[in-house]
């Protein structure tokens, strides 16, 4: 069978593959400490589940509008206006099957063969693959720990060519957990406006921040950047709704209409009754989000303290999300080799940094219970001592 050439250009998701391997080992009775999945270990808050159950009982089980339930689109537009200072109307919003589909639809609606998309590395591993599937060219701009894993205005400007159409900004970041400051965002916004390109801001981790880190949407910097900004977000991380598959994107009306057309021919609407849970998430109390954030903050502290005391590792303190991104270069191992050996010898699952465009690092998720963190850190320490910190 001859498959389409586009399939050969795309790399399967390493995070999902390693998470699946860890789950299979667990199913075989092996005690695995998994730091692989970017998924809160908390259950979806009760009031969100109750709203969805009520919608089911009320018969909200039919096809809905491709762009999303009107009431949810209104709630999202209100959220963006009041929380993010982004003046979007309901018609500027489309509800998608998770944040991932919002970005995939965007690439299909915007990117043509030959178009370039600037992606700072380390990056969320699906960004380049989505660009490739749309026929575009990912332009990877490396960043490192000395610059806080954040692209500089000079780097952005020098990466722009006549073929550049889009810049992908992820703040707070997966995998590094870094947050761009308001001053840094203003400087990047100046370049975007000056060069007249578009920027998509992936803000899925906006509510999981620590130590007073400030979240600013780049589109809120001024009217000129707002015209060129697209906002991608969702409910998976902040509200522990990963399996619900509800995301959204907001942007210029012409773009949202195009994405709605694409979605109408691919997945139709998002699960109808699940959208009523999302409405409850936006309209209800955020106390549940704060409780989860506080738990993540404690776990971050414990894991970071343990990691920074280990030989052969260095780690930048993250501002947000629920990941640590330690540098393993002192061990002499590639990230894939490191993670493979760690899983087979110590039953600890981590994600190789190569998946995120940084082979000298690994990603550890602390979206798991404290007992697993302590046990996993003990095992990681044992693993590192085995190599005496020098591979």
Image: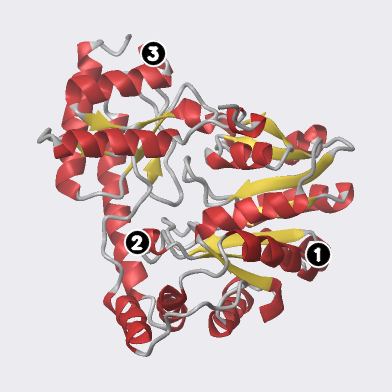
Identify which residue is drawn at 49% across, 30% down.
355
Asked if the residue at tag 3 contacts the one at tag 1, i.e. Cβ–Cβ closer than 8 Å, the answer is no
**Tag 1: Cα neighbours inside 10 Å, few (<14), some, or many (≥20)?**
some
Q: Which mark is residue 227?
A: 1
248 lies left or right of 160 = left
Q: In which quarter of the image is the C terminus?
A: top left
Question: Extreme front residue here?
Answer: 1
Total marks drawn? 3
Task: Please tell me which of labels 2 and 3 falls first in the chain.
Answer: 2
Q: Is residue 382 above or below residue 13?
A: above
Question: Extreme bottom residue here?
Answer: 58
Element under disc 3: loop
Identify which residue is drawn at 50% across, 63% down.
234
Identify which residue is drawn at 32% across, 31% down.
308
Q: Can residue 90 be seen in this view?
A: yes
193 lies left or right of 260 = right
Q: In this view, does 300 lie above or below 152?
A: below
Residue on which disc 2 sits: 293
Question: Extreme left residue here?
Answer: 29
Residue on which disc 3 sits: 333
**Tag 2: Cα neighbours inside 10 Å, few (<14), some, or many (≥20)?**
many
Considering depth in this image, is 269 or 331 the residue closer to the camera? 269
Q: Where is residue 82 in the image (x, y as percent from the top left)?
A: 59, 79
Q: Residue 387 carries which label?
A: none
Considering depth in this image, is 279 or 203 the residue closer to the camera? 279
Mark 2 vs mark 3, CA separation in Å: 33 Å
Element under disc 2: helix
Task: Please tell me which of labels 1 and 3 falls first in the chain.
Answer: 1
Mark nearest the camera among 2 and 1 is 1
Mark 2 vs mark 1, CA separation in Å: 32 Å
């Amino acid at each position: 069978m001859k498959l389409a050439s586009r399939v050969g250009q795309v790399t399967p998701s390493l995070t999902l593959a390693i998470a699946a391997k860890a789950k299979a080992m667990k199913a075989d009775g092996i005690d695995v400490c998994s730091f692989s999945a970017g998924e809160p270990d908390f259950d979806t808050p009760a009031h969100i589940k109750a709203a969805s159950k009520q919608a089911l009982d009320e018969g909200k089980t039919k096809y809905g509008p491709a762009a999303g339930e009107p009431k949810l689109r209104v709630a999202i537009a209100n959220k963006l206006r009041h929380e993010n200072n982004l003046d979007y109307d309901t018609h500027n919003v489309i509800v998608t099957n998770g944040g991932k589909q919002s970005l995939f639809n965007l690439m299909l609606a915007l990117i043509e063969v030959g178009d370039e998309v600037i992606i700072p590395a380390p990056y969320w591993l699906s960004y380049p693959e989505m660009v490739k599937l749309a026929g575009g060219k990912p332009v990877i701009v490396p960043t490192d720990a000395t610059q806080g894993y954040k692209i500089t205005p000079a780097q952005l400007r020098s990466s722009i060519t006549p073929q550049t159409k889009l810049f992908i900004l992820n703040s707070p970041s997966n995998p590094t957990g870094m947050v761009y400051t308001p001053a840094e965002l203003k400087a990047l916004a100046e370049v975007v406006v000056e060069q007249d390109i578009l920027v998509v801001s992936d803000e899925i981790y906006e509510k999981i921040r620590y130590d007073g880190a400030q979240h600013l949407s780049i589109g809120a910097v001024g009217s000129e950047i707002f015209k060129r900004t697209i906002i991608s977000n969702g409910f998976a991380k902040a509200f522990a709704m990963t399996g619900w598959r509800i995301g959204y994107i907001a942007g210029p009306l012409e773009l949202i209409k195009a994405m709605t057309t694409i979605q109408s021919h691919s997945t139709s609407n998002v699960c109808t009754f699940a959208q009523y849970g999302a409405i409850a998430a936006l309209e209800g109390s955020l106390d549940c989000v704060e409780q989860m954030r506080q738990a993540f903050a404690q776990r971050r502290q414990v894991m970071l303290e343990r990691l920074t005391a280990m030989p052969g590792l260095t780690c930048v303190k993250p501002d947000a999300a629920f990941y640590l991104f330690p540098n393993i270069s002192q061990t002499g191992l590639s990230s894939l080799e490191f993670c493979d050996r760690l899983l087979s010898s110590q039953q600890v699952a981590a994600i190789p940094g190569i998946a995120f465009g940084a082979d000298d690092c690994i990603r550890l998720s602390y979206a798991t219970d404290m007992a697993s963190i302590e046990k996993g850190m003990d095992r990681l320490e044992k693993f590192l001592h085995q190599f005496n910190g020098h591979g």
